[in-house]
Image (cartoon, rainbow, N blue to C red):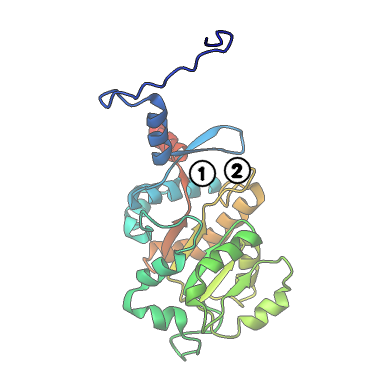
Amino acid sequence: MADESKPSKRKRVPLDPSRPKTKKSKNKALESNAQSVENENGDADVQAPVLSAAEQLRFFLDQYQSALGVTLSSLDLESIKDTCILKLPEDVDQDANDLGKHIKDAFGSSWRHELSEGKLVEGTVAPGSPAVLVISSSAIRSLELLRGLRSLTEECPPVKLFSKHIKVEDQVSLLKNRVNIGSGTPSRIKKLCEMDALGLSRLKVLILDMHSDAKGYSLFTLPQVRDEFWDLYKTYLHQRLVQGDMRICLCGPIPVVSISSKTKSR
């Protein structure tokens, strides 16, 4: 005789193949198309994995005008084309593991001469004048992005342009040689420019680190670093962008809210 005190196990009934997908799978699809992070105000910023070059340029110029309290004229805006944005492929690793490959592709057939060779060329390659400059909010992030460019720095070592554990005198000495790639923070980069140790006449690609730290701060939102960056950009870099001599690569996710809110206010 069966023991009636034991509860009987319920048999699972296979789902009908025609049954519609649950909300859970829909949420996963949404998560794959967008991510949510908190900014410094504790608000959720939805980040888009892919933005067009025009959208990236609009975001950058909005940040520029907002930070400096200026308004670019229609003539100024017309002179800055979205071709000045070096858009990374959609499948690029935002942790910069494949950054070297994409920067190499951006230089085309001249990549070896511009990024790999280590000898100075009189009248063409001046000392202390990189072809690629990486700007981050911290020394740690500067090093992480340099690791992504390691494949391009075997013959000509990069120069670390931040103040943590490195004396400015040592950096000045290193910048007397050929430099193809430099990576650092706004304050030290500006100081070396002011000392005429770091030259920007050969700069073709400016990589800006869009990564947010654990507190949600980035190059464009960390107060002191943000001010130092835009001061550096206005003084030494903006004219190169306007003249078409330099392209900007925004490396990392860009908050959509920063773009959409500006668009609505216009």
Does residue 71 sit above or below 17 in this rendering?
below
- Given contact means CB atoms under 8 Å apart, are the residues at marks 2 and 1 in contact? no
Camera-nearest residue between 21 and 43 = 21
Q: Which residue is mark 2?
A: 216
Tell me the residue at 46%/90% (across/down).
Answer: 121
Q: Is residue 185 above or below residue 27?
A: below
Q: Residue 73: percent from the left, percent from the top?
A: 38, 48
**Residue at point 56% right, 55% down?**
230
Residue 106, quarter of picture: bottom left
The quadrant in which residue 91 appears is bottom left
Pick whichever of labels 2 and 1 is earlier in the sequence.
1
| Residue 36 picture location, percent across and down | 50, 37
Q: Residue at x 47, y 64 (%)?
A: 206
Residue hosting label 1? 66
Residue 229 showing in the rendered view: yes
SS of the residue at dot 1?
helix
Amino acid type shown at disc 1: Ser
Residue at x 63% of width, y 45% of height: 214
Which of the labelled discs sits on residue 82, or is there none? none
The answer for how far apart the CA atoms under marks 2 and 1 are is 19 Å
